[in-house]
Image: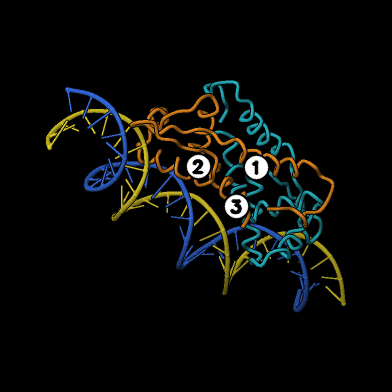
Chain colours: A cyan, B orange, C blue, D yellow
Amino acid sequence: MSILNMPFKALSDPSRRKIIQMLKGKDMTAGEIADNFQMSKPSISHHLSILKQADLVTDERRGQNIYYSLNTTVFQEVVNWFFNMTDRSGGFENEKD
Amino acid sequence: MSILNMPFKALSDPSRRKIIQMLKGKDMTAGEIADNFQMSKPSISHHLSILKQADLVTDERRGQNIYYSLNTTVFQEVVNWFFNMTDRSGGFENEKD
DNA sequence: TAGATATTTAGATAAATGTCTAATTATATT
DNA sequence: AATATAATTAGACATTTATCTAAATATCTA
C-alpha cells in the first residue's frame, strides 16, 4: 500500500481538514485546537493522533501543553499526486499510488 | 458541509485513486476498468458510483458499454484547497472548507 | 506532597464503508 | 423472440470509523 494512503484517509474527515487549516496560521496546543470544535477533547485527541500517524502534523510537549504543527513535506507529496493527475499525457502503469 | 467533502472522501480509497489514474490516460468502460482489479465487478461499479457522486468522473453509455471519463474541474477545486494550505500567510476563518 | 490543569488512553457504541453473491436492467445479436 | 453480454442494483456481512464518558498519565504550583 502506498505511503499516500494514510494522508489521504486522514484528509477525508472535515474536522481534520479544519485542524490542518488552523495549523496553517500558527502552531497550537491540543486545548486551543479543541476550543474551536463542539466535539469532546478526547475526540479531538483522536483526530490529532490520526494526523500524526499520517505525518501531516508533528507534536512537541512544552510544559503542560502539547503543541501541534503542520508538517508541510507530506503535504507536498499529496500535492504531487494531484500534479501528476493534471498532467494528462499518458498511462498509469508507472504511478506510485 | 463543504462541497469538497465528497471528493475528499472519494479519494480516500486506493482503488478509487487507481481508477482516477487509469482514466487520466484515456476514457474506459466499466468492464475495462474492472479488468485491472481483482475485485468483483459490482464492487468496481460501487466505486465508480462514488466517484460519480463526487463529480470526479462522468459516465456515458455507448451501446452495451458505459464509458467513464475524468472530470478535471472538480480536481482543480481540490488542488486549490492544497494550494491555500501551502500559502502559510494567515488564518483560517475565511476558508471554504 | 496534594491539588489543579492539560492531554491521552481505554472501552463502548452507532454509523459508515468496502466487499461479496444473486438478481435485475439495458442493449445487441442470432 | 430468445439468448448473450455489459453493467448496475439489492441485500447481507465484517471491518473501520467517529464519537462519547470515564479513567489514567504528565506536568506545574501552592
Marks 2 and 1, Cα distance to the nearest angstrom? Answer: 14 Å
Amino acid marked by disc 2: Leu
For image coordinates 60% across by 25% down, the residue present is A88
**Mark 2, secondary structure of its residue:** helix
Between A14 and B27, the one nearer to me in the picture: B27
Amino acid type assigned to the residue bearing label 1 in the image: Val
What's the residue at 59%, 48% (across, down)? A12
Q: Is the C terminus of chain A in the top left, top right, bottom left or bottom right quadrant? A: top right
Which chain is home to disc 2? Answer: B
Marks 3/2 in contact by CB < 8 Å: the verdict is no
User: Of tags 3 and 2, which is closer to the observer?
Assistant: 2
Give the percent coordinates (x, y) of residue B44. Answer: 40, 38
Looking at the picture, tell me which residue is in the foreground, A9 or B59: B59
Element type at mark 1: helix
Q: Are marks 2 and 1 in contact (CB under 8 Å)?
A: no
Q: Which mark is residue B51?
A: 2
Q: Which residue is mark 1?
A: B78
Mark 3 to mark 2 CA distance (whole Å): 17 Å
Q: How dense is the environment of label 1, judged by Cα within 10 Å: few (below 14), some, or many (20 and up)?
A: some
Q: Position of residue B20 (x, y in %)?
A: 53, 33
Labelled disc at residue A13: 3
Reading the chain from its start, which is encountered first: label 2 or label 1?
Answer: 2
Give the x, y percent position of residue B15. 48, 36
State which chain disc 3 sits on. A
Could you tell me which residue is drawn at 81 percent across and 59 percent down?
A63
Q: SS of the residue at dot 3?
A: loop
Quarter occupied by residue A79:
top right
